[in-house]
Image (cartoon, rainbow, N blue to C red):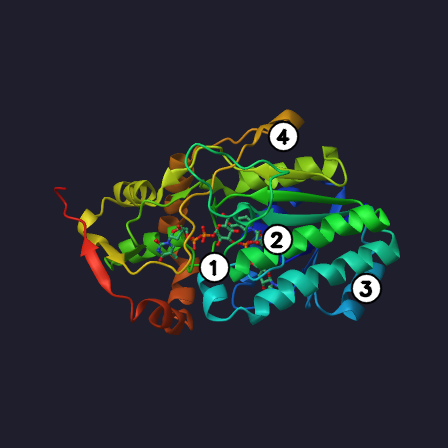
Amino acid sequence: MRTILVTGGAGFIGANFVHYMLRKYPEYRIVVYDKLTYAGNLDNLRAVWDNPRFAFVKGDICDRQQVEAVVREYGVKIIVNFAAETHVDRSIIEPDAFIQTNVYGTYVLLEVVKDLGLERFHQVGTDEVYGDIPPGYRSREDDPLRPRSPYSAAKASADLLALAYYTTYGVPVTITRGSNNVGPYQHLEKVVPLFTTNALEDKPLPVYGDGRQMRDYMWVEDHCEAIDLVLHRGTPGEVYNVGTGQEIENLAMVEVILETLGKPRSLVHFVEDRPGHDRRYAMDISKIRALGWTPRYTPREAIAKAVRWYVDNPWWWRPIKEGEFRQYYERVYGHRKVLGTLRDTS
Ligand code: NAD
Ligand code: DAU
């Protein structure tokens, strides 16, 4: 039995990856190592908790001693690193934890992989490291990195460290750079769950700026399949872009949410923009396609599918929305000026 350590496996994509891997590979054991920050949620792992091939350890990736002990105890051969501070708006307010976890934490994991001679370190990266992409262009894996938020700068640093460990020490590292994921168990701070649950409660949807920013919304399990493929067929030292290759405007994403729920456009409130907001992300995905991966869902299909999950699973999101998230919401949205609204007929 091979053991994979999934760091950050109690978060959104990590938990989906755990479900996917346990289902697909009867010969794998999965150990989740997670600090359980505000974003970590054991409800995300409820369905696999009693699986004998699953184990959970609470811990910080910055704690080298504990990471090493867990790797030894479980005979870990592969680390897939999802652990990170992930929300751009939070990185603007309080960057500290982003530098600590996303940069120092990745360094700690790389040190352990190097010193204990593990088979693979996979870093789950983001398309945000390429920065704001002009219309007509798609980022390629060897493009220069131009991150513009504390979040993306920290993620870019992690990618560079991982590649440096490959070059300098021969650590078998792979990196995927994913676009915006949507699907089950995504924290309500992110736009699709936030807007869906607000709309379900007939509350305003706070669209930043003019809502014409472009994102490539991808179904989370498509992303999990791509990571799986890179783990098994990818080449160490290589980076792979993962997305649908079909970015859409945020206003189009909002339309899908409202249509799926049968809610009025008057819920849309244009509010003050996010500082340094990247207008467009768009990636060339030919490299991962050549490896044999293809996304199953378009952005519109993925968003509609995600919306339906939140409709069907209020048990999951209501406790979050009624908890400390309320203070966060007040802090980020309470003072934002409303610049305009959408009319139902427009
Ligand atoms: P998330 O915020 O939902 O979950 C992050 C998880 O990491 C949480 O369970 C949290 O408790 C854990 N964590 C945070 N700090 C930790 C630490 N110091 N030690 C151990 N665990 C810690 O994140 P997500 O959206 O699932 O993203 C997962 C990864 O994928 C991140 O690396 C992110 O940068 C990357 N990514 C996300 C997206 C997206 O659309 N969400 C897209 C591309 C890449
Ligand atoms: O592109 C991949 C990245 O996608 C990941 O690396 C990040 O971890 C993940 O959080 C996500 O970053 P974004 O900043 O793109 O996601 P977010 O859901 O915060 O916002 C998506 C878009 O919606 C973005 O253009 C900002 C806009 N937005 C967001 C929120 C929360 C709004 O208009 N209003 C909002 O309230």
Label 2 vs label 3: CA separation? 25 Å
**Residue at 72% over, 35% down:** 234
Circle 2 or circle 1, nearest the eye: 2
* Label 2 packing within 10 angstroms: few (<14), some (14-19), many (20+): many
Circle 3 or circle 1, nearest the eye: 1
| Residue receiving disc 4 | 287
Identify the disc placed on residue 88: 1
Type of residue at label 3? Answer: Glu
Circle 2 or circle 3, nearest the eye: 2
| Residue receiving disc 3 | 68
Look at the numbered disc 3 and say if its residue's Cβ is closer than 8 Å to ligand 1: no
Look at the numbered disc 1 and say if its residue's Cβ is closer than 8 Å to ligand 2: yes
Upstream in sequence: badge 2 or badge 3: 3
Element at label 1: helix
Label 4 vs label 2: CA separation? 20 Å
Q: How far across and how far down the image is residue 335, in percent?
A: 29, 71
Element at label 4: helix
**Residue at 30% over, 44% down:** 251
**Most foreground residue, 1 or 70:** 70
Badges 3 and 1: C-beta atoms under 8 Å apart?
no
| Residue receiving disc 2 | 156
Q: How far across and how far down the image is residue 217, in percent?
A: 44, 41
Query: Which quadrant: the C terminus?
Result: top left
Label 3 vs label 1: CA separation? 30 Å
Query: Which quadrant: the N terminus?
Result: top right
Is residue 176 at least partly visible in the picture?
Answer: yes
Label 4 vs label 3: CA separation? 33 Å
